[in-house]
Image (cartoon, rainbow, N blue to C red):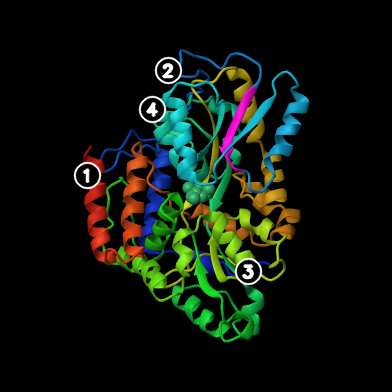
Amino acid sequence: MATRTSAPALIATRPTRPAATAKSHRTRVLQCSATLVAAGLVLTACGSSDDDGGSGSGPAGSTSFEGRGPITYVAGKDTTGSVQPVLDRWNKLHPKEKVTFIQLPTDADAQRQQMIQNAETKSDAYSVLSLDVVWTSEFAAHQWIDKLPEKQFPLDKMLKPVVATGQYRDGLYSVPVSADGGLLYSRTDLLKKAGVAEPPATWAEMKSACAKVKKLPEAKDMSCYGGQLQKYEGLTVNFSEAVNSAGGIVTDENGKPDVDTPEARKGLDFLADSVKDGTIPKEGITYLEEDSRQAFQSGKLIFLRNWPYVYSLAEKSEVAGKFGVSPLPGLNGPGSSSLGGHNVAVSSYAKNKATALDFAKFFSNEENAGTFLKEASLAPPYGALYDDKALVGQYPYLPVLKESILRAVPRPQVVQYGDVTSKIQQEAYAALTGDKSSAQALKDLQKDLEKAAAQ
Ligand code: GLC
């Protein structure tokens, strides 16, 4: 029971500066400029090249996708249970080239660490990697993944900003399997009972809706809002979204940090003040995606910021039929999401790369994207699936989600992403715990990001 699907204005208006960022980002993609070094972080999201690659450029001595046999697929823990059935289908069709699923922790930073460790030891244990969209540049620049033959993938059927997450300098290094856009999950049953007709478009509306809902006896112990605020990649996402949703930016279109601004402060203040005044529960600063989902499903939260995967799981939980989905709220109107998602890449150190490439094509094809959407409400990279009548029947919020992904603000696409994200996490967390004021945290973050840019 999605709500507001018929109110495109909710997502049509975006804060001016992020909109500019998104536009510039698109321009970069289309124009395929060279690496940009504009006194900023080294941007690496250049446009699509016609080079069909086809040859692995990894340091492991492999110059082409050769060799057939068993492979592994390495990804974060599959909380939706939708991956193994797809792997089983591959294994049935390819009995001599079976894929084994290696599941890493759910925490994005822990996944990144394990994948990097594996690459640094030049291990062949990981063949096909499920990369977070923000890691492509770093993995490609270090030659931990191979350049892919891009003409062999149906990229023209995929949403452009999503394809751009797989590009680094002169080519394609990872292929989208699922996109991710942040959504606001609301307990529409309680909103209705409290006389709130629509989910909130602004943070102020959200807080006032909570005040009304909390007057209901069954809601008096509930908290208003939860997101992902533990010190990990999820905090980078939630911080960036808050900054963008207040009209600020973290870095500009040239990769130059510009986060010490009144707009960014309003964004960070929303999070820090919400922790202070109890809008966000105390334990909210320990939440990863799964903790916040559990809190919402067990009736602890009125509103939840989370990714699309939560929809199908929540529909099987205690709150089934009692919640709706709408765009993220912002300071003066609907907010903007960070662009998330996962892409497949072939490890430079993999054996059996011909099989690995075929598997990457299979795993990222439109049919499987449809399966992941149907079974696990994962946002597909393929534009047409958002307009499919049967799918929109199952997930009425698909048009809203498509818009939100098209308008989502990418996190910095930089080689030194690990440094950038850990500085963001450190400063944002200091503001959440009250160790620093938002103003001080942003001042320090600006300096840190400038330092990272100068390296
Ligand atoms: C989701 C997103 C990913 C993001 C992560 C943060 O997995 O798809 O892009 O980095 O959440 O926790």
Number of residues whose C-alpha sits closer than 10 Å to that of mark 3, classed few (under 14), some (14–19) or many (20 or more): few
For mark 1, give the secondary structure.
helix
Q: Which mark is residue 59?
A: 2
Residue found 64% across the figure and 15% down from its top: 68
Q: Which mark is residue 6?
A: 3
Residue annotated with mark 1: 451
Q: Quadrant of the N terminus?
A: bottom right
Q: Badges 3 and 2: C-beta atoms under 8 Å apart?
A: no
Residue annotated with mark 4: 142
Q: CA distance from mark 2 to mark 4?
A: 9 Å
Queried whether the magenta region covers residue 365, the answer comes back as no
Q: CA distance from mark 3 to mark 1?
A: 45 Å
> Is the CB atom of the residue marked by disc 3 within 8 angstroms of ligand 1's nearest atom?
no
Instruction: For marks 3 and 2, give the one nearer the viewer.
Output: 2
The amino acid marked with disc number 4 is His
Is 244 rendered above or below residue 93?
below
Q: Earlier in the sequence, mark 3 or mark 2?
A: 3
Number of residues whose C-alpha sits closer than 10 Å to that of mark 1, classed few (under 14), some (14–19) or many (20 or more): some
The amino acid marked with disc number 2 is Pro
